Image (cartoon, grey):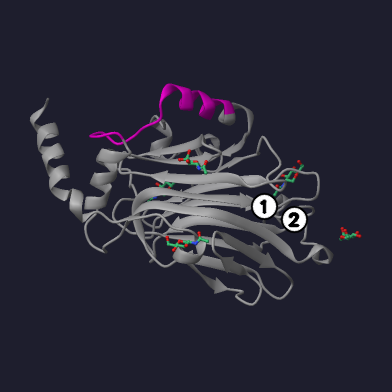
Amino acid sequence: MENFEKLFILFLFALIHTIVLVDANFSKSMYITWGAQHAILQGEDLQLVLDKTSGSAAETKKRFLFGTIESRIKLVPGNSAGTVTAYYLSSIGSQHDELDFEFLGNSSGQPYIVHTNIYTQGNGSREQQFYLWFDPTADFHNYTIHWNPTEIVWYIDSIPIRVFRNYENEGIAYPNKQGMKVYTSLWNADNWATRGGLVKTNWTNAPFVAKFNHFRARACKWNGAISINQCALNIAANWWTSPTYKQLGYAQLGQMNWVRNNYMIYDYCRDTKRFNGQMPPECFKAQF
Ligand SMILES: *[C@@H]1O[C@H](CO)[C@@H](O)[C@H](O)[C@H]1NC(C)=O
Ligand SMILES: *[C@@H]1O[C@H](CO)[C@@H](O)[C@H](O)[C@H]1NC(C)=O
Ligand SMILES: *[C@@H]1O[C@H](CO)[C@@H](O)[C@H](O)[C@H]1NC(C)=O
Ligand SMILES: *[C@@H]1O[C@H](CO)[C@@H](O)[C@H](O)[C@H]1NC(C)=O
Ligand SMILES: *[C@@H]1O[C@H](CO)[C@@H](O)[C@H](O)[C@H]1NC(C)=O
């Protein structure tokens, strides 16, 4: 065993008693920040409602640095054009980090778009979009963001759809210093969401309802200071496969390729026109 590894494991044993792992349901971990008059937050369930008067939103009480954030979501059924359901992590300030899942509604019988993005130190512009291989309005599905010091993985029903790896040592910013809250919201974005704003929200179908349940943040509570905190090290030992942080195995890579080959509809790394040929540096790095 390498000396480093020995030291690392000793270090973990020394820390094992100081761990804070949060694992809670919606009512325990979140509060409603907008549209409280018609959103519902109860036990394992959160219902966000949008009507002509207001959308709604909720966020976690705590901030996290690294972890697995999981929720089951049933999206607005029927004609949801113009609505956006968002489920994301974000820190605060102009140099903020953010990890996004957004669901862009569509006319009845037309597919939802799953929009993903990542901001590092205030800089986004890394959109990737997908269609789904199921009807996301018929039932609840598992949308999970796994964020460790080595990589970030977006999962749908345990199928990885996107990875963003840490290439900080090559000058590409990585979110590992700022704690993030988990946010959810349902709002009217008919100025851009459906076919670039061409399709407007049809309010005769209101109220629009997005349902969430089984929220789990198996995550490290952020203490506001250090980056790779004690909890992250513990998670590394117990669940991210010590001592290297978990990365995808071959079977999961196969699943991810299946999604990306068949369901991906936009990738910023292929949008040479947008970046005028000056592609973002991570586009030249392996992302798996
Ligand atoms: C939510 O979580 C809290 C804390 O873990 C627990 O006390 C409560 O019973 C849970 N409620 C439901 C409905 O699961
Ligand atoms: C949701 O997906 C994540 C990531 O694959 C997985 O760890 C978790 O167990 C899943 N949750 C459920 C309830 O299946
Ligand atoms: C809505 O569905 C149409 C037809 O499949 C598609 O062209 C359009 O991009 C979709 N828009 C959104 C926002 O999902
Ligand atoms: C809005 O929805 C109602 C009820 O489904 C429908 O009758 C009406 O034609 C729709 N309006 C537009 C502009 O599509
Ligand atoms: C912001 O991100 C874009 C896209 O990834 C990249 O091209 C650009 O260089 C970044 N800007 C800064 C200041 O990091």
**Residue 54 rendering spot, x and y as whole percentages:** 67, 73
Q: What residue type is labelled 1?
A: Leu
Q: Residue 75 has which mark?
A: 1
Residue nearest the observer in this picture, 43 or 184: 43
Position above or below: 262 against 71: above
| Residue 94 as seen in the image, left or right of residue 40 | left
- Report the span colored magenta: 241-258
**If the image is split into quadrants, where does the N terminus sit?**
top left
Residue nearest the observer in this picture, 183 or 175: 183
C-alpha gap between disc 2 and disc 1:
9 Å
Badges 2 and 1: C-beta atoms under 8 Å apart?
Answer: yes
Name the residue that disc number 2 marks: 80
Residue 133's image quarter? top right
Q: From this viewpoint, is residue 127 visible?
A: no
At 10% from the left edge and 37% from the top edge, which residue is drawn? 7
Residue nearest the observer in this picture, 11 or 172: 11
Position above or below: 57 against 286: below
